[in-house]
Image: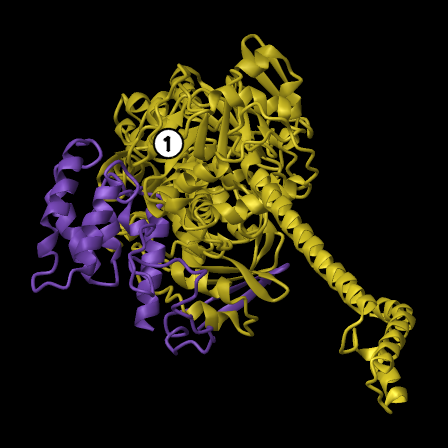
Chain colours: A yellow, B purple
């Protein structure tokens, strides 16, 4: 504005001069006017006086031309800018689809996050249209971005056709692009696949796993499969559920899945499982992964559900080949098969670890101890079984139960060294005790698999391990993590990492929902359960850490309060005892140990245990009390401070069946 | 007669049936049935079908998923006298598809499809629905199935 004023001030003398000329002309022509002085201020404001004058006309012409010229220049600049902007946006969105032909790269310096952001906006539109509509948009602007150029050129020859309905020109078995890529073939991955297929009609989901088996459930591997009386159970992998119906540990039979080669051509989409392939490299900027056989697969959305690898004791790792050969790290189907074989052929097995897996395996093997003349030893550093989960009084009680299953329990045992002598293993403990055994099962925890963190540039949590993700399980715009490997933010309970089956199902489902645009946080609290024989079973939810202060409300147990009785009566799919198991144990347990067991049962037969953090209930165990999980979930969801937990315990009706 | 003992940081209370007879005075926050974060049942608050409901097992996600969705949607939105009478073709397509995968959809198909219809007509998809759809329903994740569906029951009841 000031500029205009100065310009006007400069033009004013010119205007005055021209008006003087005008007046002179007027006088000359005889049109005198006495309003000469009045003309002068007027002349300041007007561009040109009325009347003729060649200089005036010239002046008017000049100024007019200048204005028009300015307008034209402005218009062209703005138009050109907006055109440049459009080009840039198209280039950015085309970059991630690699529909590139050999065109020169334009020097664009946009951040990868900007790429991801625009991509996300484009992708998170109504799902069915997303995949097909993005292809035509990407095709018209095939510009090669300069930084990932080498990678892109490799991908170019493979990705010259549009996935939906396009023929697969290359002879590679594996599709080179998939809309949904799930890394890992476990429970979380399968739950996500199911969720995606339910919400995105015709979705094409590719699961890549380094195992040779399609997705299966893990809990039966340490429970039901051991109680089966079918001699071929290691082959069939079938177990009896609570309702007597048999099922396989595989989530679905092979006919559920389609072949990876057929994924692109499948009209209604499907779930394909690529077994025996490990993902070794992840390129987040380029939205693609590389397998161990150098195949590259690009994706639109990716889930990392790599789970974990069993931890081992350092003393065993350092002990050498001979000891490692006689050690089982239990996690997969092949571990179950080999341990089953071992248990039939050796005289003594030692389980190191007193948590869920260790105690369940100890009970399962303990049951076999009478059949096969097998000694089962369980050792752990805590004072009792489940010492890190149950409060001390309950942990002691549980240990007695495990002992009654035929297990030799050695508590407060720290392993100092393991050597192999005369084809037997000698475990030396820090306090000097010596345990001689034939085989070791190490159940000392799980190391989350974060191998891809480095190449993908994903954050790893230092407190809990695993990939750090937000409350919606998202690590980056197109990458989600679920299951054992996810360290996520729980809105109610804070950041945590959970290694339970139901959590894998819940988080896998949630990740699948969010991959199809739901944007929901982790809210439905997952639960877990454990059975230690036919008399002790519990379900738990939330943070169940024995270091927290607890309040336990117990009732006297009757014969009706066992997991077995609970399933028979209620008919829900929670417990999984089989009838054969009942007949096998009753002669042993009830006859010899009846008196002492009864006494203990009087004390902690059934009840509810609340775990408190800053006076708020953050975890609940339902001890031999079943079908009340929704109430427990509600209490944790509320997150309220309750003055009298006995009143809260009333909500569970622990005395009823 | 209840009594209480303290073992370190852990408190233990023993209660008899009489102690718990009086109703609880613990206050719970009322649930919002339209909470978007919560797990939904078979029918969403806006009336649509929740294809991701655990009660459906894998019906909507398997190889015959699209046929199932079409048949079920047609039935759900049907306004005829005999509900679903115009959906015969859809159901036939679904049956044909299912017959191609006998492993996944065993020969209790007719029972399943009629049970599926029954469940859509009642909002509270009872836990028995979840267990009546083998082998799609997983036994152990059925825990979350029965949890979520019985939670719906609690909500509708309260």
The answer to whether any part of residue B133 appears in the image is: no
Above or below, B77 against A409 in this view is: below
Q: Residue furthest top?
A: A422
Above or below, A375 against B95 in this view is: above
Write down the quadrant of residue A285 in the picture: top right
Above or below, B111 against A371 in this view is: below
Can you give x and y, in whole percent of width and height, for residue A45 in the image?
A: 81, 79
Can you give x and y, in whole percent of width and height, for residue B122 in the image?
A: 21, 63
Kindly identify the residue that appears in the image at 53 percent across and 23 percent down.
Answer: A155
The answer to whether residue B20 is left or right of residue A233 is: right
The answer to whether residue A389 is left or right of residue A374 is: right
Q: Residue furthest bottom?
A: A34
Q: Nearer the viewer, residue A11 or B69?
A: A11
Read off the residue under disc 1. A367
Label 1: how many Cα within 10 Å (few below 14, some 14–19, many 20+):
many
Can you give x and y, in whole percent of width and height, for residue B130 in the image?
A: 26, 50
Can you give x and y, in whole percent of width and height, for residue A323 in the image?
A: 58, 15
Kindly identify the residue that appears in the image at 80 percent across and 71 percent down.
Answer: A53
């Amino acid at each position: 504005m000031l500029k205009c004023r100065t310009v006007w001030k400069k033009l004013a003398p010119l205007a005055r001069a021209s008006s003087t000329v005008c007046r002179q002309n007027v006088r000359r022509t005889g049109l005198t006017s006495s309003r000469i002085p009045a003309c002068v201020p007027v002349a300041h404001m007007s561009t040109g006086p009325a009347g003729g004058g060649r200089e005036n006309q010239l002046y008017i012409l000049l100024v007019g031309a200048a204005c028009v010229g300015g307008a034209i220049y402005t218009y062209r600049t703005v138009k050109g800018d907006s055109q440049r902007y459009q080009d840039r946006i198209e280039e950015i969105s085309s970059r991630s689809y690699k529909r590139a032909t050999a065109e020169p790269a334009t020097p664009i310096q946009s951040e990868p996050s900007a790429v991801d952001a625009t991509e996300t906006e484009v992708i998170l539109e109504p799902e069915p249209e997303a995949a097909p509509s993005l292809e035509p948009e990407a095709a018209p602007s095939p510009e090669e971005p300069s930084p990932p150029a080498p990678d892109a050129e490799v991908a170019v020859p493979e990705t010259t056709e549009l996935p939906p309905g396009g023929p697969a020109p290359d002879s590679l078995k594996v599709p080179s692009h998939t809309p949904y890529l799930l890394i890992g073939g476990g429970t979380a991955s399968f739950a996500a696949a199911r969720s995606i297929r339910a919400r995105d009609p015709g979705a094409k989901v590719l699961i890549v796993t380094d195992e040779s088996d399609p997705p299966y459930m893990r809990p039966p591997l340490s429970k039901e499969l051991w109680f089966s009386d079918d001699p071929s159970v290691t082959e069939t992998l079938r177990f009896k559920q609570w309702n007597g119906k048999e099922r396989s540990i595989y989530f679905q039979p092979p006919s559920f899945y389609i072949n990876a080669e057929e994924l692109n051509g499948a009209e209604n989409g499907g779930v394909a499982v690529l077994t025996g392939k490990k993902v070794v490299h992840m390129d987040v900027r380029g939205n693609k992964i590389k397998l161990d056989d150098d195949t590259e697969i690009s994706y639109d959305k990716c889930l990392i559900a790599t789970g974990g690898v069993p931890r081992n004791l350092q003393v065993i790792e350092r002990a050498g080949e001979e000891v490692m050969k006689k050690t089982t790290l239990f996690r997969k189907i092949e571990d179950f098969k080999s341990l089953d074989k071992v248990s039939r052929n050796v005289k003594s097995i030692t389980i190191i670890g007193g948590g869920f897996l260790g105690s369940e395996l100890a009970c399962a093997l303990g049951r076999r101890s009478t059949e096969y003349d097998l000694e089962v030893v369980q050792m752990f550093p805590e004072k009792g079984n489940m010492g890190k989960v149950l409060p001390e009084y309950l942990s002691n009680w549980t240990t007695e139960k495990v002992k009654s299953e035929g297990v030799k329990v050695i508590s407060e045992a720290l392993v100092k060294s393991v050597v192999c002598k005369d084809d037997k293993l000698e475990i030396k403990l820090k306090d000097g005790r010596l345990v001689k055994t034939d085989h070791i099962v190490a159940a000392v925890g799980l190391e989350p698999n974060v191998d891809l963190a480095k190449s993908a540039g994903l954050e790893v949590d230092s407190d809990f391990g695993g990939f750090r993700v937000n409350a919606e399980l998202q690590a980056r715009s197109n990458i989600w993590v679920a299951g054992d490997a996810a360290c996520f933010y729980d809105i109610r309970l804070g950041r945590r990492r959970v290694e339970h089956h139901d959590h894998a199902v819940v988080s896998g489902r949630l990740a699948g929902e969010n991959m199809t645009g739901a944007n929901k946080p982790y809210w439905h609290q997952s639960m877990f359960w454990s059975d230690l024989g036919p008399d002790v079973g519990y379900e738990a939810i939330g943070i169940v850490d024995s270091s927290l202060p607890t309040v336990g409300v117990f009732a006297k147990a009757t014969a009706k309060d066992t997991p077995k009785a609970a399933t028979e009566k209620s008919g829900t799919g929670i417990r999984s005892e089989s009838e054969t198991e009942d007949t096998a144990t009753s002669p042993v347990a009830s006859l010899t140990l009846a008196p002492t067991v009864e006494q203990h049962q009087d004390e902690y037969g059934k009840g509810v245990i609340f775990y408190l953090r800053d006076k708020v209930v953050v975890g609940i165990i339902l001890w031999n009390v079943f079908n009340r999980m929704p109430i427990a979930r509600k209490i944790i969801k509320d997150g309220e401070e309750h003055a009298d937990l006995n009143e809260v315990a009333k909500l569970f009706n622990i005395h009823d069946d | 007669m209840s009594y209480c003992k303290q073992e370190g940081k852990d408190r233990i209370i023993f209660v008899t049936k009489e102690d718990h007879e009086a109703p609880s005075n613990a206050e719970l926050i009322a649930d919002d049935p339209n909470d978007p974060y919560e797990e939904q049942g078979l029918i969403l608050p806006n009336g649509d079908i929740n294809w991701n409901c655990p009660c459906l097992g894998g019906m909507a996600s398997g190889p015959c998923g699209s046929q199932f969705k079409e048949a079920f949607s047609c039935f759900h939105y049907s306004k005829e006298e005999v509900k679903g009478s115009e959906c015969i073709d859809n159901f036939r397509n679904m049956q044909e598809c299912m017959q191609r995968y006998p492993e996944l959809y065993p020969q209790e198909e007719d029972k399943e499809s009629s049970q599926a219809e029954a469940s859509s007509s009642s909002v509270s998809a009872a836990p028995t629905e979840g267990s009546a759809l083998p082998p799609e329903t997983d036994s152990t994740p059925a825990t979350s199935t029965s949890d979520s569906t019985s939670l719906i029951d609690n909500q509708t009841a309260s």
